[in-house]
Amino acid sequence: MKDLLRTEHLSREDVEILLGTASEFARNPLSKNTFLQNKTVAIYMTKPSTRTRLASESAVAHLGGHPIFLRGDDLQLGRGETIEDTGKIMSGFCDAIIIRTFKQADVDQLGLFSTVPVINGLTDQDHPTQLLADWVTIRENFGEDLTGRKFVYFGDGNNISHAWLIMGAIMGAHVVTATPAGKWAPDPKIVETARAIAAKSGATIEILHDPKVAATAASVLYTDVWISMGDSESDRDEKFSELAPFQINQELMDRAAPDAIFMHCLPAHRGEEVSVEIMDGPRSVIWRQALHRRTTIQALLYHLIKGDLKGN
Ligand code: CP
Ligand code: NVA
């Protein structure tokens, strides 16, 4: 496996390798601090980022390398140079590329035309590096035995909801999305992919539209913003009123398992997708989850560049 372009490309074995190394990098961030000595990693983003950028630049630095951050309009790509030519040039100067942009197809193309590893740092469709961080955090809280545990995503059927279903399927977990039915539900094609993976892994996929049913006995209550980067604001009022019952608050948390945790990829909008009391309360693991953005990107760079991952 050369790249991480889509969550669905990871095998269970790959994820286990990455989670193990990420835990090691959490304990000892500098244990491989000459791995990228005299090497560079390009980080190209056409959307804003707090965590993914900081995590990526820190990860490269901890491996002894030099990150080169490029904003969308820094490159000739914005002036009509092709992704193919850009990928070839970047591969000549860098040992890996991390890209955050709108279209999944652009990331897939960059992977195709680059000879160095390309990592998807978020598209409209997917966010694989986030889900790696989420699963290190889930393991830290619940260990490896998933028996009887239900992991629920609430809110907008967006990129995170997609990655949530796919990664849960890979891990053989009982994963749920609780979203309104219709235009704010997860993409049916992604649900189909998750179900196909689940058929092999033994995972259970549930696509629900009742937040109370979804929250009952859940071990993880996860949410994300209701308006994602690049989303239209034109139907904001309609969307927010349909999503209101999916806010993670004390009422939903009271239905969850006694040891349930609250997760959020961040950035958060308190009072919208999550109440203040839950976001900043004792069940919230959001800061640890955010820290693991660095440990997992560091693990990904390490194993992709070494060529340790097999894909599926
Ligand atoms: N969770 C996440 O990807 O955050 P940023 O958008 O700040 O990178
Ligand atoms: N769904 C959000 C995730 C941000 C990390 C977005 O795409 O804006």
Image (cartoon, grey):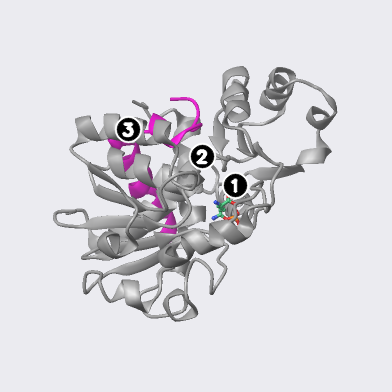
Q: Name the residue rendered at 37%, 80% in the picture.
A: 282
Q: Name the residue rendered at 28%, 34% in the picture.
A: 195
Horizontal side, residue 177 vs residue 267: left or right:
left
| Residue type, label 2 | Leu
Q: Earlier in the sequence, mark 3 or mark 2?
A: 3
Identify which residue, 124 or 73, lies in the foreground: 124
Alpha carbon distance from label 1 to label 3: 24 Å
Question: Which residue is label 2 attached to?
Answer: 301
Alpha carbon distance from label 3 to label 2: 17 Å
**Label 1 SS:** helix
Q: Considering only vertical position in the picture, is 282 above or below 274?
A: below
Q: Are marks 2 and 1 in contact (CB under 8 Å)?
A: yes
Question: Which residue is label 1 attached to?
Answer: 60
Percent from the top left, x then y, of residue 261? 33, 68
**Label 3 SS:** loop
Question: Which residue is label 3 attached to?
Answer: 11
Magenta stretch in the rendered image: 1-26
Q: Name the residue rendered at 55%, 47% in the picture.
A: 63
Residue that lies at the very extreme toward the left in this rendered image: 147
Identify which residue, 125 or 289, lies in the foreground: 125
Q: Magenta span has 13?
A: yes
